[in-house]
Image (cartoon, rainbow, N blue to C red):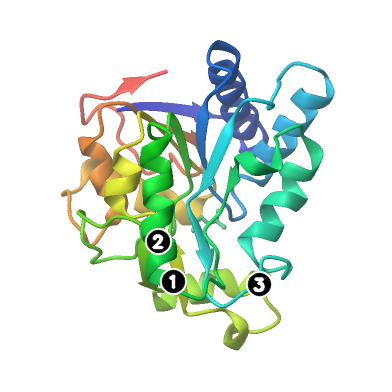
């Protein structure tokens, strides 16, 4: 595991966008796994700005998003489909057919999950997976007590996640309580993983996911078992780490 600590949110966003650009530069047909939420917003802005400056070409990349709320149409402004188009896809040259986001309104949701998983597998897997992390340690919508063996599937959202995500909705009642999400096993199959986190409210979770037991009660702790994972944090999110404690590469 490698940990990169940046001074603040903007620097963290720039660092992640540069690493993505570097990956695409060396492998134009990169398969990218993408995340939503507040954390990656600055990074998506940076990617658009790199594209506007002709520094990055998205024409041959393929993307797979981690998750989508169940029951929201893809044009619903609260859907992750809308978020991704609004913050990234509408501003870059990725072909529409190369964009993959689970369908929250699929008529057969179990089949949608299997098809999504198969599509990832058929293309040869995800080269670089970007992750955020919930305060409860979730990655994707893999909530505490998830099975590490899970593939893409329907999940019930944890109360803390519903509360945390209610800031994007008019009220807590409007937050869907289910989602379709890549499973831990899907995520762990990615060749490289970058987890980004900022802010003091994530500091305890970051510390526990790096130093604590590997346990389904803290889903991100499973990343300790991944051979190529980099945490990119701002100072506040890294503030509870005891960097002398474990054998971690600091960059
Ligand atoms: P956030 O969400 O970026 O909005 O904090 C992260 C997550 O829940 O994975």
Position of the C terminus, as image quadrant, is: top left
State the CA–CA distance, disc 1 to disc 3.
13 Å
Q: Are the two marked residues, 1 and 3, in contact with CB atoms closer than 8 angstroms?
A: no
Compared to 246, does 161 lie above or below? below
Q: Secondary structure at mark 2?
A: helix
| Residue 234 in view in this figure | no
Residue nearest the viewer, comparing 30 with 38: 30
Q: Please rate how many residues cluster around mark 3, counting C-alpha atoms within 10 Å: few if below 14, some from 14 to 19, many from 20.
A: some
Q: Secondary structure at mark 3?
A: loop
Q: Position of residue 49 (x, y in %)?
A: 79, 29
Mark 3 highlights which residue?
Answer: 73
Compared to 27, does 4 lie above or below? below
Q: Earlier in the sequence, mark 3 or mark 2?
A: 3
Mark carried by residue 250: none
Q: Are the two marked residues, 1 and 2, in contact with CB atoms closer than 8 angstroms?
A: yes
Mark 2 highlights which residue?
Answer: 113
Q: Position of residue 136 (x, y in %)?
A: 37, 63
Please indicate whether residue 164 sits to the left or right of residue 194 in the image.
right
Compared to 241, does 154 lie above or below? below
Mark 1 highlights which residue?
Answer: 109
State the CA–CA distance, disc 1 to disc 2.
6 Å
At a point 52% along the width and 34% down the height, the residue shown is 32
Ligand 1 lies under 8 Å from the Cβ of mark 2: no
At a point 77% along the width and 34% down the height, the residue shown is 92
| Residue 10 in view in this figure | yes
Q: Position of residue 71 (x, y in %)?
A: 56, 78
Q: Earlier in the sequence, mark 1 or mark 3?
A: 3
């Amino acid at each position: 595991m490698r940990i990169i600590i940046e001074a603040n949110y903007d620097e963290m966003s720039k660092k992640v966008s540069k690493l993505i650009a570097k990956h695409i530069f060396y492998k134009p047909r990169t398969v990218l796994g993408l995340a939503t939420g507040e954390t990656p917003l600055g990074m998506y802005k940076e990617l658009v700005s790199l594209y506007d400056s002709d520094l990055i070409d998205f024409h041959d990349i393929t993307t797979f998003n981690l998750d989508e709320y169940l029951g929201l149409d893809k044009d619903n402004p609260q859907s992750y489909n809308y978020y991704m188009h609004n913050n990234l896809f509408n501003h870059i040259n990725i072909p529409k057919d190369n964009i993959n986001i689970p369908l929250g309104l699929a008529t057969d949701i179990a089949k949608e999950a299997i098809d999504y998983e198969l599509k990832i597998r058929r293309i040869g897997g995800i080269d670089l997976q970007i992750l955020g992390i919930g305060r409860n340690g979730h990655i994707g919508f893999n909530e505490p007590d998830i099975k590490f063996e899970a593939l893409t599937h329907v999940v019930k959202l944890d109360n803390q996640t519903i509360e945390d995500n209610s800031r994007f909705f008019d009220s807590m009642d409007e937050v869907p309580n289910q989602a379709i999400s890549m499973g831990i096993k899907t995520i762990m199959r990615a060749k490289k993983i970058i987890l980004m986190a900022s802010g003091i409210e994530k500091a305890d979770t970051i510390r526990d996911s790096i130093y604590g037991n590997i346990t389904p009660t803290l889903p991100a702790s499973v990343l300790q078992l991944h051979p190529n994972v980099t945490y990119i944090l701002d100072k506040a999110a890294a503030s509870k780490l005891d960097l002398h404690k474990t054998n971690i590469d600091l960059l």
